Image (spheres, grey):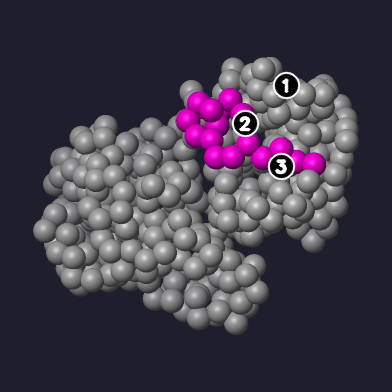
Amino acid sequence: MSIPTVRLVRIVVVAETFLPEMNGVTNSVLRVVEHLDRRGHDVMVIAPGSGPGRVGRVPVERVPGVALPRYSSISVGVPGRRLRQLIKGFAPDVVHVAAPAVLGAAAVFIARDAGIPAVTIYQTDLAGFARRYHLPIASAPLWRWLRHVHNAAAVTLVPSSTCAWDLRRNGIERVHLWARGVDTERFSPERRCEAWRRQVSPRGRPIVGYSGRLAVEKGLHRLAPLAARRDLQLVLVGDGPTRRRLTRTLRGARFVGFLDGTDLARAVASFDVFVHPGIDETFCQAIQEALASGVPVVGPAAGGPLDLIRHGENGFFWLPEEDDTIVTAVDSVLGDDDLRHRLGRAAQESVRHRTWERIGDDLLGHYVRSLPVPTRRLATA
């Protein structure tokens, strides 16, 4: 997508969670901020709790935060006078709100009252989490809240077609698709490392890998049949609140802990097949990183993965209503080396165009279209 040169856009990015906590929201905010900075725009990040005060040249302003129950590492921002002062003091043209829930919701209403367009990024399935944590009664109130928040924004950007359908079905307006980018230089088949493979699978067994948070909503219990196998090695990259429990229930698996940067890229490229057992993914960046690494993917026929996996071409779906199809799909990949190599080549090709530069410019286009017409004309002059 080609957009005109943007001259006047100043952006406040309000992140519901941010560094030092590393998750999908943090990762996408970092990529957005880096792109906006490279393009020469004035950017400020507002984030909860304590943490770094800058990302490169971009200032990060902190507001008070409280730890989430069962997720003590995640700090949720407490809206207050400081949030309003920061937004109005920066005088942005656009307020970018990443995964609005509490702090982000307050930012949307502050922006609306000030006549500033808010662009909200939907990437956390709160209603799905409520069901997964055995709180189905909370689903309807959560949708009412999300409807109230997102309909106060100029536009809501969603990462997948399934998300778009779900939000529209629940009464959220002005919904547009905005995918996620992937660093195709970092995540590449060239990162595959035989020494790392010998380290995690010393008997030379094929490696079935997962990377991401170790949390209830990721459905990692579904990997128990693979962990028990002796003809393959299940490897989990990541950390989270359920790690201790999973080391007991997935006894045959190797847990290598949290990795990032080139260490993460090396691990993912060294898998023989990537498996994702969660069914509540709004996008699933980990799947996209595996595809970029030339690794066939086994993922759920649900949510964001529906836009990423091409069944029989770059991987296989498993059926959410039939957990045993995870094993069937993994065996289909591992049982045929020619198929696995073909899937791997197609995997890399399927995301080659999804660079963060292109995705970032798409986002700038959404910013410009959200501006009032007179400002939009100036911004694109």
Where in the figure is residue 16, as x and y percent of width and height?
38, 59
Identify the amino acid type marked 1.
Arg
* Left or right of residue 139: residue 19: left
Q: Earlier in the sequence, mark 3 or mark 1?
A: 1
Where in the figure is residue 263, as x and y percent of width and height?
53, 28
Identify the amino acid type marked 2.
Val
Q: Name the element at disc 1.
A: helix
Badge 3 local density, few (<14 within 10 Å), some, or many (20+)? many
Question: Which dot marks residue 198?
Answer: 1
Of residue 2 and residue 367, the one placed in the foreground of this image is 367
| C-alpha distance separating marks 3 and 1 | 20 Å
Q: Earlier in the sequence, mark 2 or mark 1?
A: 1
Q: Which residue is drawn at the image coordinates 39% and 56% (left, top)?
A: 17
Badge 1 local density, few (<14 within 10 Å), some, or many (20+)? few
Query: Can you tell which quarter of the image residue 135 is in?
Result: bottom right
Residue under circle 2? 268
